[in-house]
Amino acid sequence: MRRTSRNVGTPVRAFIYAVVIHIVFGALLGVSLLIQPQAVTPAPAKPVQAKAIDLAAIEREKRRIEEKKKKAEAEKKRKAEEKRKAEEKKKKEAERKKKLEAEKKKKAEAEKKRKAEAERKRKEAEKAKKAAEAKAQAERDESEAVSAFGAVAWAIKEQVEKNWSEPGDFSGLSVAFLVKVDRQGNVLSVKMTRSSGNARLDESAENAIFKASPLPFPGEARFYEYLKEFNFVFKPES
């Protein structure tokens, strides 16, 4: 019984397989018919419209551009030249001012030197004038001092002789001294400048001068510088 069932099932399955295969091939055939390529019809080409080229306009434009370029270059050169001239003018003006300042400074220095020289000469002249005036005044004072001393010279001689007392004969003898006094006529020092040759006379005469102090002396203070030292010659009366 089991063997019979196996033999019956085999043809059935084969039949089913055949049907399925036919269905598949049919489906494939239908699909292939549906996807067949279609012819592409090209679109009609649009005609290109040609434009006329205006060579004269191109040339005019080219000339315009060139002219513009030339004008720009000319303007650039003009501005550069103006700048150069302005800088040159500025430089010259600066040099002119510098030169003027230098000349002004030079003149100021020269004027300063001139004034300094004039001032120096003025001071020298003033100094010389004062020196001359002082010298003239000194000469007048000295002359007046000598005159004033001459007025008291006999009084000094008499006062010294009154204070001299040395016995003996001294006829023809004399002794010279340099006498220094203060402003009141007080004798400060007595220096023998020439001896009489007689020691007794020399010593007694010197002592007499000291004893006669203060000596008569001019009271004018300006005379003192000329009379603070004077020569005195002592000669005994015979």
Image (cartoon, rainbow, N blue to C red):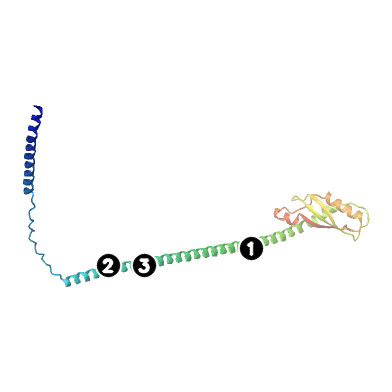
Looking at this view, is 4 or 104 the one in front? 4
- Of residues 29 and 166, the one nearer the viewer is 29
Q: Nearer the viewer, residue 66 or 10?
A: 10
Look at label 2 and name its amino acid. Answer: Ala
Q: Residues within 10 Å of mark 2 (few under 14, many from 20)?
A: few
- In the rendered image, the residue lying farthest to the top is 1
Mark in the foreground, 2 or 1:
2
Q: Is residue 162 above or below residue 85?
A: above
Q: Secondary structure at mark 3?
A: helix
Residue type at numbered disc 3: Arg
**Residue at position x 17%, y 72% in the image:** 55
Q: CA distance from mark 1 to mark 3?
A: 64 Å
Q: What is the number of the mark on residue 84?
A: 3
In the drawing, does residue 216 fall left or right of residue 88? right
Q: CA distance from mark 2 to mark 3?
A: 18 Å
Mark toward the viewer: 1 or 3? 3
**Which residue in the protein does label 2 denote?**
72
Q: Residues within 10 Å of mark 3 (few under 14, many from 20)?
A: few
Q: Are marks 1 and 3 in contact (CB under 8 Å)?
A: no
Left or right? Give the position of 139 relative to 110: right
Q: Secondary structure at mark 2?
A: helix
Q: Position of residue 152 (x, y in %)?
A: 77, 56
x and y, in percent, of residue 91 in the image: 41, 66
Report if the CB atoms under discs 2 and 3 are less than 8 Å apart: no
The disc at residue 128 is 1
Q: Amino acid at mark 1?
A: Ala
Q: Residue furthest right?
A: 168
The quadrant the C terminus occupies is bottom right
Where residue 39 sits in the image (x, y, percent)?
Answer: 7, 55
Q: Quadrant of residue 155?
A: bottom right
